[in-house]
């Protein structure tokens, strides 16, 4: 019996998802439950940070393969409703979305649909030509060496929205040319590394145009579902927010900011329809996920899924300027290096409208730590270091 190519692709995708899930499940089965002493120590640490049963909180995941898997939620996803945070609670990942965007783009590179050294204007002709002899390359977007101005600095009132209530990636593309005089390049392309969200707005747009489908659908079909991340999604439009029968279990957190004068937590971000998002740009952010799915993402990253080995190696290699000066950022990943330049850890942080997140993968101890929080006052770096010390103390390495 012959099947249409689309049906065969769908069958292969589901089979691949099954294999990834089976591998991840086998890996999880080998991980040990944390000791009562470690759980109590983490509980006390979280309480000292000010998180309690009446405030926004945090979800924490720690994995040491074959030795430990810890995941637990603390505090409230919604202060108004009293909804607790659990490992199933979904958070806006903010810039922790960037590794997904980079992976999507690099998948297209592996498929021969573009190259890292292509001129960005080949795919986004709306972008102005800043220099005829030194164009912005796709590689520059991935490793933040483009010099592009920050799109957040543009006046929202100047952005021509194609949708009545919210702006999307395409709405911002013409702004770079329109405001070129007021917002020129911050530095000569390739001369240094400087983090800018504009780079990943453009990368998501390139993925969308090359793949010929919405960015949210591409990462869902090519990354989330094959990894078994059934409840992760990209919030690219109000319609992209899934409404399912198990919404109570997979509740979505609101981001909260502390108001000192009124001594209260004020909600500052959420998903439609509960929250009206006026900027629905994706690529630099926009992914919503939970501990359960991020654990599967961690398993996929550990197994080097989705990309060719050489591509993974390049993604986790420190970038260099046009003159060869190295910096601690690869292709979508923040890198942590030793004095000799070797990478001992990688990951990414994400901050947006009350959400504070971190994914950290230590290559030496093989330890992964994921922190998802909906309170703007939480220092995830400080919390990570404290968690790391507790694991060292309670888990024999």
Image (tube, rainbow, N blue to C red):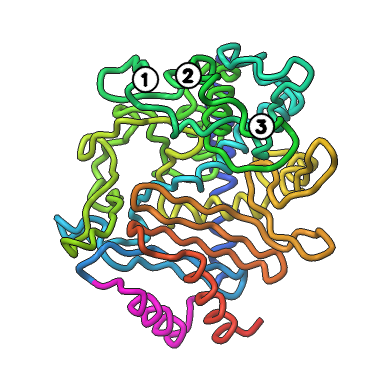
Which labelled disc corresponds to residue 208? none
Check disc 2: other Cα within 10 Å, few if <14, some if 14-19, many if 20+. many
**x then y, percent, for residue 21:** 54, 49
Query: In the picture, residue 130 is in which quadrant?
Result: top right
Distance CA(mark 1)–CA(mark 2): 8 Å
**Residue at the disc numbered 3:** 146
| Residue 129 in picture, x, y percent from top left | 65, 15
Give the labeled residue for mark 1. 158
Residue 226 locus on image (x, y percent): 54, 39
Alpha carbons under labels 3 and 1: distance apart: 23 Å
Q: Does 207 sit above or below residue 261?
A: above
Q: Is residue 51 visible?
A: yes
Of the numbered discs 1 and 2, the one sitting upstream in the chain is 1
Residue 199 magenta:
no
Q: Which class describes the residues within 10 Å of circle 1: few (<14), some (14-19), or many (20+)? A: few
Part of the protein shown in magenta: 33-52
């Amino acid at each position: 019996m012959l099947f249409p190519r689309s049906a065969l692709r769908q069958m292969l995708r589901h089979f691949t998802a099954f294999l990834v899930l089976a591998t991840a499940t086998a890996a999880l089965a080998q991980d040990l439950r944390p000791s009562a002493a470690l759980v109590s120590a983490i509980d006390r640490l979280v309480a000292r940070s000010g998180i309690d049963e009446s405030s926004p909180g945090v979800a924490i995941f720690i994995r040491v393969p074959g030795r430990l898997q810890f995941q637990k939620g603390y505090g409230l996803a919604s202060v108004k409703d009293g909804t607790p945070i659990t490992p199933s609670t979904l958070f806006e990942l903010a810039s922790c979305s960037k590794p997904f965007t980079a992976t999507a783009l690099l998948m297209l590179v592996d498929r021969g649909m573009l190259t890292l050294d292509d001129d960005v204007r080949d795919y986004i002709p709306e972008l102005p030509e800043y220099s005829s002899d030194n164009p912005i390359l796709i590689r520059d977007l991935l490793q933040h060496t483009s010099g592009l101005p920050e799109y957040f600095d543009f006046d929202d009132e100047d952005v021509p929205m194609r949708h009545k209530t919210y702006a999307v990636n395409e709405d911002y593309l013409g702004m770079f040319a329109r405001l070129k005089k007021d917002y020129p390049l911050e530095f000569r392309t390739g001369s240094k590394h400087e983090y800018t969200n504009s780079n990943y707005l453009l990368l998501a747009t390139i993925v969308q145009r090359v793949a010929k489908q919405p960015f949210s659908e591409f990462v869902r079909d090519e990354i989330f579902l094959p990894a078994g991340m059934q409840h992760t999604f990209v919030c690219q439009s109000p319609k992209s927010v899934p409404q399912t029968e198990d919404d109570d279990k997979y509740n979505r957190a609101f981001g909260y900011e502390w108001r000192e004068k009124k001594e209260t937590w004020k909600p500052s971000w959420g998903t439609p329809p509960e929250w009206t998002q006026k900027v629905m740009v994706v690529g630099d952010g926009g992914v919503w996920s939970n501990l359960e799915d991020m654990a599967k993402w961690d398993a996929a990253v550990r197994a080097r899924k989705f990309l060719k080995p050489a591509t993974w190696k390049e993604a986790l290699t420190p970038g260099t300027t046009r003159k060869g000066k190295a910096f601690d950022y690869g292709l979508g990943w923040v890198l942590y290096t030793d004095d000799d330049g070797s990478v001992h850890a990688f990951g990414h942080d994400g901050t947006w409208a009350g959400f504070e997140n971190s994914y950290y993968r230590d290559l030496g101890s093989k330890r992964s730590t994921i922190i998802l929080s909906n309170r703007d006052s939480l220092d995830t770096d400080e919390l990570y270091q404290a968690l790391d010390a507790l694991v060292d103390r309670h888990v024999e390495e």
